[in-house]
Amino acid sequence: MNVSIVGSGYVGTTVAACLADLGHDVVNVEIDADIVASINAGEAPIHESGLAERIADHAGTRLRATTDYDAVRETDVTFLCLPTPQSDDGSLDLAIMEAGAESLGRALAGKDDDHLVVVKSTVLPGTTENVVAPILETESGTPIGEGIEVAMNPEFLRMGTAVRDFLEPDKVVFGTASDEAAATLRELYAPILEGEALRASNNASGGEPRARDGTDLVETDIREAELIKYANNAFLASKVSLVNELGNVAKAYGADAYEVLEAVGLDDRISERFMRSGLGWGGSCFPKDVNALRAGAREQGYEPELLDATVAVNDGQPRRLVALLADHVPLEGARIAVLGLSFKPGTDDIRKSRALDVIDALTARGADVVAYDPVAIENVRADYPDIEYADSAEGALADADGAVVATGWPEFDRLSFDGMARRVVVDGRRIDIDEDALEVYEGLTW
Ligand SMILES: NC(=O)C1=CN([C@@H]2O[C@H](COP(=O)(O)OP(=O)(O)OC[C@H]3O[C@@H](n4cnc5c(N)ncnc54)[C@H](O)[C@@H]3O)[C@@H](O)[C@H]2O)C=CC1
Ligand SMILES: O=C(O)[C@H]1O[C@H](OP(=O)(O)OP(=O)(O)OC[C@H]2O[C@@H](n3ccc(=O)[nH]c3=O)[C@H](O)[C@@H]2O)[C@H](O)[C@@H](O)[C@@H]1O
């Protein structure tokens, strides 16, 4: 099938390379000329396991990129993989989606054959039909349902394991308004639905083993598909916040939350996954998506009290971590090592990383921060020019009066804390530490 993908970031690039791998002819339409050049040169513009090989294999044959929206005219289906960021007030900002839909609609004007526009970006219920579709109709001059159709296909991939998650998902969700649109999506996703997509070229790795075999197909209406994505992220973020709340309670009782929750997770209804308590959730999606859902719910007249609490618990964890450290080290003028800066291990993405909240709290209390991360330092430096950076974990720990673990990079396991002035460590991620080698070891939730 001939497919165009508008927006070539984490999602758009991954989806494009994977669909090319499945035998489709794919073109990425992207406004960033550097990304376009990178893909056309056969190089991955982002780091994801299994992505570089796929782009190198297919660039110039089944995969290309362009800044020219007219490329969509040669295709049957367009996926919109544009950013849907958070406005200052927390609500969903659709400006980029609207601009993309305008360009797409203009490019589709006068196209002879049928075209399916699939929203893959995370958008609130009603957006595909009430925002995207009318723009497409106005700009193309083609009534929706008479040549151009819209559908919604949310994406559940995680950063760090994006290729594997896309090719071997737990579920695929098609929100459509017609049998034809559903049939097109089924054809496009056939190898994934049949469980043959990853096996075809088994070179994507990373992440935990799958909990189960097989991919479920959910076929529903557009509005439900839109909400399934938010409900999924809200559930996962709330699960981590609940785990953190239970962890805080466990700590107050002098109990180990990890032992408690390991046992709790043996209940099939709960599952042992997403049970790591500590510094909380960050990244480019959970924070903005939970906030968009809260704002959207309020707009619909519903007070989302549990989602408010989910955010409040999450926001409290960095402060709790710093308070624990302050119990042992007077922070004013102290040299404090911050280990880990990215929002989770395996990525250099620092968006809404809890590590940054820890740095803010430490500097607000007068501490001198020396930070280390294996890949994310350059991303932090621009916003935090005044803190010190080390080029190794040991370098950050040298002469430090205390240390905090903010991201659970595997390389921090069994670290030597010998060089510290005072071996005081507060761990926000439950890494593997030789506690006996420390003067003070505090787990945030254990
Ligand atoms: N990053 C992730 O792990 C996941 C993201 N999502 C959702 O997918 C959507 C896209 O997210 P990401 O790929 O992370 O965003 P991103 O920010 O990595 O990439 C978006 C791309 O769109 C390009 N772009 C912006 N305006 C454009 C325009 N008018 N025309 C063409 N290209 C344009 C940007 O230059 C950028 O390369 C969001 O709604 C997000 O919530 C969903 C699942 C996972
Ligand atoms: O909508 C999105 O963009 C994506 O958001 C998340 O993926 P991602 O943000 O890449 O990362 P996760 O692995 O889910 O971790 C999110 C945050 O939760 C934290 N977390 C996760 C699990 C856990 O047990 N404890 C915990 O604190 C992580 O450290 C991280 O800060 C979802 O897992 C994806 O399904 C979804 O597609």
Image: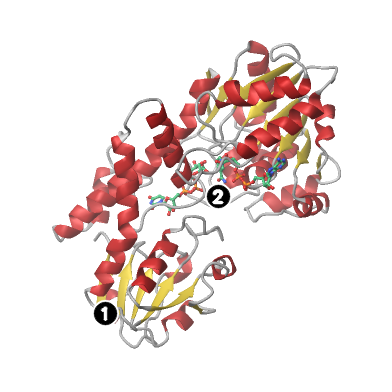
Residue drawn 62% across and 49% down?
Answer: 204
Mark 2 Cβ inside 8 Å of ligand 2: yes
The residue tagged 1 is 329
For badge 2, the amino acid type reads Met
Q: Are marks 2 and 1 in contact (CB under 8 Å)?
A: no
User: Dot 2: within a 10 Å radius of its alpha carbon, few (fewer than 14), some, or many (20 or more) residues?
Assistant: many
Classify residue 430 as left or right of residue 126: left
| Residue 159's disc number | 2
Quadrant position of ligand 1: top right
Residue 255, relative to residue 81: is it above or below?
below
Residue drawn 78% across and 24% down?
Answer: 76
Percent x, y of residue 326: 26, 74
**Visible in this render: residue 337?**
yes
**Visible in this render: residue 407?**
no
The foreground one among 410 and 232 is 232
The foreground one among 216 and 249 is 249
